[in-house]
Image (cartoon, rainbow, N blue to C red):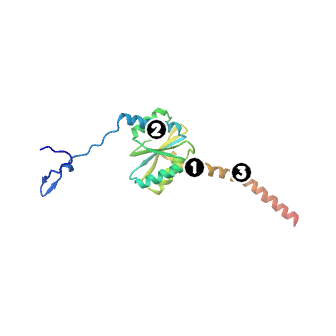
């Protein structure tokens, strides 16, 4: 009798009959070397254009949440890619960043941008607060050097450039505003 994976041949185990295919494990095909080279090339070109890179750890991340986060990242000008750690590390090695690569436990993705250096860390950190235990910052690369999770969290709390410029203008404007108020009070006293 010839059996294939889809055949429904009963196997008697006590009072239960189980189909033959319940015992056959489905093998997952490994990524081919060509596909690996393609992924490393994609990561290498991404890292070449990036002003900052954030390593994102995730567990139990639903497709709906991932899609929503990808839209938020895209709106902030950030790109996001999930790859095997070994391929990410190989692409990082080719770029020659300084320092030590942070530990990357579990499933890992990379987020990068060429514009606002704090955007990848900031968006992922904000989204990670919404989904506690699902997303975490594992580290990153900033100005050609590796940073650990703690330093990337500090980078994530830096406001966007537009907000920083507004704060700077406020600091400059504050003494001028105080001078104008003082001059106005003097004018009121003289006219009274």
Q: Secondary structure at mark 3?
A: helix
- The front one of 166 and 188 is 166
- Quarter of the figure with the C terminus: bottom right
Label at residue 6:
none
Q: Position of residue 114 (x, y in %)?
A: 55, 42
Residue on which disc 2 sits:
43
Label at residue 172:
3
Q: Position of residue 145 (x, y in %)?
A: 52, 37
Residue on which disc 1 sits:
158
Position of residue 36 relative to residue 74, above or below, is above
Give the class, few, some or many, for how many residues have Cα within 10 Å of label 3's Cα (few <14, many ≥20): few
Q: Specify whether 112 is left or right of 60.
A: right
| Circle 2 or circle 1, nearest the eye | 2
Give the class, few, some or many, for how many residues have Cα within 10 Å of label 2's Cα (few <14, many ≥20): many
- Quarter of the figure with the N terminus: top left
| Circle 2 or circle 3, nearest the eye | 2
Q: Secondary structure at mark 2?
A: helix
Q: Residue at x 81, y 61 (%)?
A: 184
């Amino acid at each position: 009798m010839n059996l294939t994976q889809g055949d429904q041949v009963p196997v008697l185990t006590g009072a239960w009959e189980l189909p033959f295919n319940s015992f056959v494990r489905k093998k997952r095909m490994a990524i081919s070397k060509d596909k690996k080279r393609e992924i490393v090339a994609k990561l290498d070109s991404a890292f070449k254009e990036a002003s900052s890179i954030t390593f994102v750890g995730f567990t139990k991340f639903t497709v709906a949440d991932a899609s929503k986060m990808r839209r938020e990242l895209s709106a902030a000008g950030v790109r996001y890619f999930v790859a095997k750690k070994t391929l990410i590390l190989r692409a990082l090695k080719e770029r020659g960043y300084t320092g030590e690569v942070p530990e990357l436990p579990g499933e890992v993705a990379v987020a990068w941008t060429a514009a606002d250096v704090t955007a990848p860390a900031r968006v992922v950190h904000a989204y990670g607060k919404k989904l506690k235990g699902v997303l975490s910052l594992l580290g990153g690369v900033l100005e050609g050097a590796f940073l650990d999770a703690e330093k990337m969290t500090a980078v994530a709390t830096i406001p966007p450039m537009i907000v920083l410029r507004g704060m700077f203008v406020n600091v400059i404007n504050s003494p001028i505003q105080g001078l104008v108020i003082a001059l106005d009070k003097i004018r009121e006293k003289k006219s009274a």
